[in-house]
Image (cartoon, rainbow, N blue to C red):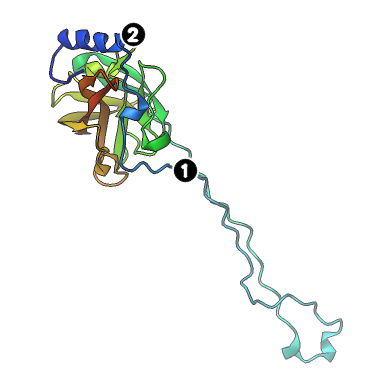
Amino acid sequence: MSPTPRRPARRAVLVTAAVLGAVCLTAGVRMAVAPPRVDVAPAALVASTPAGSPAPTSAPADPSTTDASAVPRPAAAVPPPVVAAVPPLAPPPDRLRVVDVAVDVPVVPVGVGAGGALELPDEPGAVGWWLAGALPGAAEGTVVLAGHVDTVTGPGVMADVLDAPLGARVEVGDGRGGTVPYRLVERRVLPKSAPLPDDLFAVTGPPRLVLVTCGGDFDRRTRHYTDNVVLLAEPAA
């Protein structure tokens, strides 16, 4: 597959590659750094008596016979444990829409496999959301979506996404019935021989969307594409 030809020429190339057994496998989309995200509920904050505090003692049976200064003061009441409220987990994104090229497909969470390879959905008609990245609509960080450009039966969903022109509107479903809009601003073609740049997977910094798939020439010997194609998008009004 090459990102240069337009349909229908691209579809003919993709189908030919698919018949030869070429798919954009998980091992094809590699990242330089892919730290896992672990969602842990906040631990309960329990108030306790400070270390070194004297233990409470019982008052004398007959205080009148005892020096008042020797009577221990009542221990301060220990407040009940303070339990931090557990915030509701935000739902993952669930749709990817690119109206200009008639794309409207499901999105499912994906992780990182052996060797730092970004996993892709088993279903070629779905796009994977890197669960260690940002959520759509977050104030900072990158939302990373990746998908197949072709399959053993024909073109994958990202084949059409690659046809989207710069400036096209991309919408990502927020998992709550709403959508977060983005606008395509840049297209990069990067060799698979090198890991994808770290900055494409930033969890901080300006909010943006990154779409990743296979591209370049199809290597008949390795049955892989030579490049990764990266589309970058910024939040749109």
- Mark 2 lies on residue: 153
Instruction: Name the kind of residue labelled 1 in the image.
Output: Val
Q: Are marks 1 and 2 in contact (CB under 8 Å)?
A: no
How far is the residue under mark 1 from the one under mark 2? 36 Å
At numbered mark 1, what does the secondary structure look like: helix, strand or loop?
loop
- Of labels 1 and 2, the one closer to you: 2
The location of residue 185, given as percent across then percent down, is 15, 32
Outermost residue toward the right? 61
- Seen at 27% across and 43% down, the residue is 198
Q: Which residue is mark 1?
A: 38
Q: Is residue 192 left or right of residue 3?
A: right
Q: Quadrant of residue 90?
A: top left
**For residue 148, which numbered disc appears in the image?**
none
Could you say which is closer to the camera, residue 146 or residue 12? 12
> From the image, which quarter does the C terminus lie in?
top left
Earlier-in-chain disc, 1 versus 2: 1
